[in-house]
Image: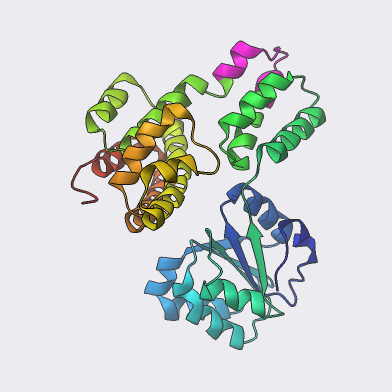
Amino acid sequence: MILKSFEINKINLDINNLILFYGKNEGLKSEALNILIKDKNIISYYEEKEILDNENNFIETVLSKSLFDPQKFIFIKRATDKILKIIENLHQKKLEDITIILNSESLEKKSKLRSFFEKNKTLVCVPFYPDNDQTLSKLTYNFLREKKISISSSNINLIVSKCSGDREILMNELQKIEHFSKNGKKINNDNISKLINLSENHNISDLVDNCLAQNKRKIISILNENNFSNDDCVIIVRSFIIKSKKLLALSKAFETNKNIDLTISSAKPPIFWKEKEITKQQILKWNSKNIKQLIYSLSETELQIKKNINNSINLITDFILFQSSSTVNN
């Protein structure tokens, strides 16, 4: 059964024990998850690889019941077709008092996992598409109106353009602005720029772009000239994931048409003229298979950074220097 992202309230947890979220809008997924679990029991998180490596232990955990946990929630990250057999097995057991939510990135129509959820009436499949600027602007206006914060339209556009279609980033920036305004300080162009780290993010964008283009000399220069914080490392890895996903789409197009200029000119959204040359370098350096592996590695690195935030700078620096090596993708 297919539901749209705004139809989450239609899910009946007594009947719909297995739910699939897929798509690139992680912020919207988080909101949907909060609607589902509300004030219910603590949710358990698993990586797909963790389950595949310990299938029997996972199934035993799912099927075990506790008098102290009448409702159990399990959230499986980065789910792919590899986990389908396990899900089919659990579905046959007619689960009670448990909800399993699988989170996947973009799934093609031919995906067996997606097809399994779409065709079964008791299973729920929810696609989460990226937010456009209009949606993010509306979220921004509503947030600011609720918090009684006055900001010009040009500054709202500035904030939205900085978020790369990711509502999680948008909400983080709006919360910074809210905390700043609570001290009675006025929001103007200067403190907006400082609050949302525009100059730092420009360097972060350059860092990620040059890493994907494997311009090692430029990368070392950016790393030496900037004093990135632990919080910056999370922004770097999120920016890396967003740009890698865009590069994956371009790489697939290039592998089909074999024309680099056509790939660039037909890109959606359009590539800004200043970014065309470095984007060409990136496309020529990476094929779609390697980009998929890169995205997986980025997700693993993000997890490690969040677990070891005090060591995050070393983790992200090692990752960037490794990926920028000319031997990585040859």
Query: Is residue 289 rendered to the left or right of residue 253?
Result: left
Count the numbered circles shown.
0
**Residue at image location 66% in from the left, 57% down from the top:** 33
**Residue at image location 79% in from the left, 66% down from the top:** 10
Q: Which residues are magenta?
A: 178-194
Give the answer, above or below, for where 186 lies relative to 65.
Answer: above
| Residue 186 shown in magenta | yes
Q: Position of residue 144 (x, y in %)?
A: 76, 28
Query: Is residue 14 rendered to the left or right of residue 199?
Result: right
Give the answer, above or below, for where 92 lies relative to 27.
Answer: below
Q: Viewer-proximal residue, 59 or 121?
A: 121
* Visible residue check, residue 297: yes
**Residue at image location 56% in from the left, 52% down from the top:** 24
* Visible residue check, residue 204: no
Q: Position of residue 279 (x, y in %)?
A: 38, 37
Query: Quarter-wise, where is residue 21 in the image?
Result: bottom right
Query: Quarter-wise, where is residue 1 in the image?
Result: bottom right
Q: Viewer-proximal residue, 96 or 156?
A: 156
Q: Residue furthest bottom?
A: 92
Q: Viewer-proximal residue, 240 or 252?
A: 252
Query: Is residue 300 rendered to the left or right of residue 140?
Result: left
Query: Quarter-wise, where is residue 241 in the image?
Result: top left
**Residue at image location 58% in from the left, 34% down from the top:** 163
Give the answer, above or below, for where 316 lies relative to 30.
Answer: above
Q: Position of residue 296 (x, y in %)?
A: 39, 55
| Residue 8 shown in magenta | no
